[in-house]
Image (cartoon, grey):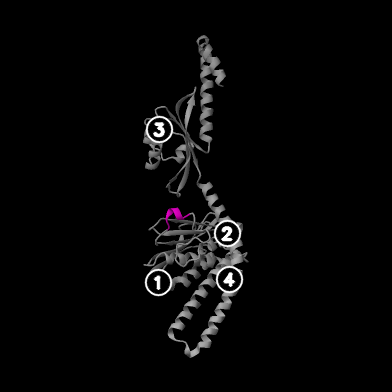
Amino acid sequence: MRKFLERAMDRVSRMNEEAIRGLLRVLVDENDRLESVLDSMLDGIVVCGDDHVPILVNKAAERFLPLAQAELFDEPLWMGVRDDELSAFFQTVLLGEESVLDREFVLDSPGGARILSICVTPLVKDKRIRGTLVHVEETTDKRKREARLRRAESLASLTTLAAGVAHEIKNPLGSISIHVQLIRKALGQAAGEPVLKYLGIVNEEIDRLNRIVVDFLFAVRPMDIAPINDDPNAVVREVAEFMRAEAAQQGVTLSEKYERSPPLLSIDKRYIKQALLNLVKNALAAMPDGGKLALNTEREGDEFRIVVADTGTGIPEDKLGKIFEPYYTTKENGTGLGLTLAYKIVKEHAGDMTVRSKQGQGAVFTIGLPVPQRERRMITDGECQGAACVEEDS
């Protein structure tokens, strides 16, 4: 096309009106084709002139970047970006004529945090810099996949380590416990108060170690899941009733809100209850001075969701990617396996678990379970979905 245009420009002075019109039509068609290609790209492209003012912005860039459209093509790029961190970045890089590769930024959006990877390179023509090319790629899903892969690798390493540790520790623990009981029995009435106290502490520590070993074994053994068609609302109600007294004792108000017409899910009630209990106990631990705990269920399309929301201390944003990893815990006496086991249970049911939280603003854990194909076909006009639910406050 470039050679064609060069030849046409050489002969333009000898062209008649019809030939010039034809040339203009070719130029318009080529320009439309170029715009279509740019707008069809999945990545964002911004081209700035040597004065740093945008001269071309494709559709993907408009979606990804928080741009002020009214000022976009009249002022330097950083003036039209409605995010302080991004604006300062563009100003520094463009004025400094720097090249930047894969700089990542986290932007808040109504659908959750989005991660953008931005490259800035000079636009060169005839061996001179004529402007700047900005390439924008959304890497949110890529980072999530990497996090899931790290969790899977952590679970694999957990399997190898815990299997060996559990078998090496569990038997000696049982022997120690038996001999502590024999010592207590042998001392009988002669045992003074301090001795009984020390033996009690030993027993408590043995029990704590045994719980850790049991958690390890639970994490590494294949789950003998026996799913049947069951009512997920009933499972959540049982957990709520079981934990209600403990919540009240801590000054925590427990509320429930249920999907009115829940589908039957293919689940193993024992394991789903265990996953929910782990989430609820973590929520209560995050509210030592009381608060609110909500257990909600809802259906969203082909997914049934169980939501556990608290008003506790929350989770720092830099820790959110680690909480499902084995051994990671913020508790003084925690094993770091509670959330890992809950995540594993949900995955065994072909579901997923997500978390939203900010430090000091509580946490929201969501378990998403697939609705069986048969249940999807049984949706009726009167079925409750989303917000149309039955609420039970206690």
Determine whether 188 is above or below 201 in the image.
below
| Type of the residue with mark 2 | Leu
Residue 155, labelled with which disc? 2
| Type of the residue with mark 3 | Gly
Q: Which residue shows up at 42% across the image and 70% down it?
A: 247
| Residue segment shown in magenta | 315-320
To which residue does mark 1 refer?
A: 248
Residue density around tag 4, few if under 14, some if 14–19, many if 20 or more, within 10 Å: few
Q: Which residue shows up at 53% across the image and 63% down it?
A: 342
Q: Which residue shows up at 59% across the image and 60% down it?
A: 348
Q: Nearer the viewer, mark 3 or mark 4?
A: 4
Q: Earlier in the sequence, mark 3 or mark 4?
A: 3
Residue density around tag 2, few if under 14, some if 14–19, many if 20 or more, within 10 Å: many
Q: Quick check: can you spot residue 349?
A: no
Of residues 48 and 152, the one nearer the viewer is 152
Disc 3, SS: loop
- Give yes or no for contact between labels 1 and 2 (Cβ–Cβ under 8 Å): no
Q: Earlier in the sequence, mark 3 or mark 2?
A: 3
Disc 1, SS: helix
In the rendering, at what x and y percent does residue 243 appear?
46, 71
| Type of the residue with mark 1 | Ala
Q: CA distance from mark 4 to mark 1?
A: 37 Å
To which residue does mark 4 refer?
A: 169
Q: Earlier in the sequence, mark 4 or mark 1?
A: 4
